[in-house]
Image: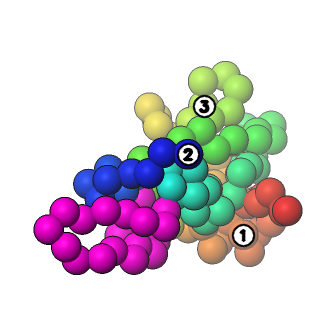
Amino acid sequence: MAYLSIWKMLRAAPVRSAGLLVAASASLHLTSVTASEAAGDQFDKFPFVISCEYKGMFHAFYLSRITPEGLATYVASERLAGTISLDGHAKAVGGSNGGNCLGKTLDQLQESGQAHFIKP
């Protein structure tokens, strides 16, 4: 496993969730967080699947990616996609066809039983 530089680590995960322990020296090195651990932290915060109803059909939106800023993209069949952040509201990508998920926060999606996490 390769270790990340401070710059790459800060770009890979928001500072609020990185949990970095850095020794101040002439050259800064990240000593305890690897690339795979940083990515795992981000994926633990978002549900793997969000289920939404749209035009009488039920769609499973699967987690596709998370940007360094913490914006998650979910995709479903028929080229449907949406985004959501940890503290934002669900938005459709390329239109308003997100059904009963649009405008909800992650907490609201969890409360309504629409957010599904992978349990270890």
Quickly name the residue at label 3.
Answer: 80
Q: Report the Cα–Cα distance between label 1 and label 2.
A: 34 Å
Residue at the location (70% across, 26% down)?
A: 77
Quickly name the residue at label 2.
Answer: 1
Tag 1: amino acid: Gln
Q: Position of residue 119 (x, y in %)?
A: 84, 62
Q: Position of residue 59 (x, y in %)?
A: 76, 39
Q: Which residues are magenta?
A: 13-33
User: Please, is residue 81 above or below residue 20 in the view?
Assistant: above
Front: mark 3 or 2: 2
Q: Secondary structure at mark 3?
A: loop
Front: mark 1 or 2: 2
Quickly name the residue at label 1.
Answer: 110
Of mark 1 and mark 2, the one earlier in the sequence is: 2
Q: Report the Cα–Cα distance between label 3 and label 2.
A: 35 Å
Q: Are marks 1 and 2 in contact (CB under 8 Å)?
A: no
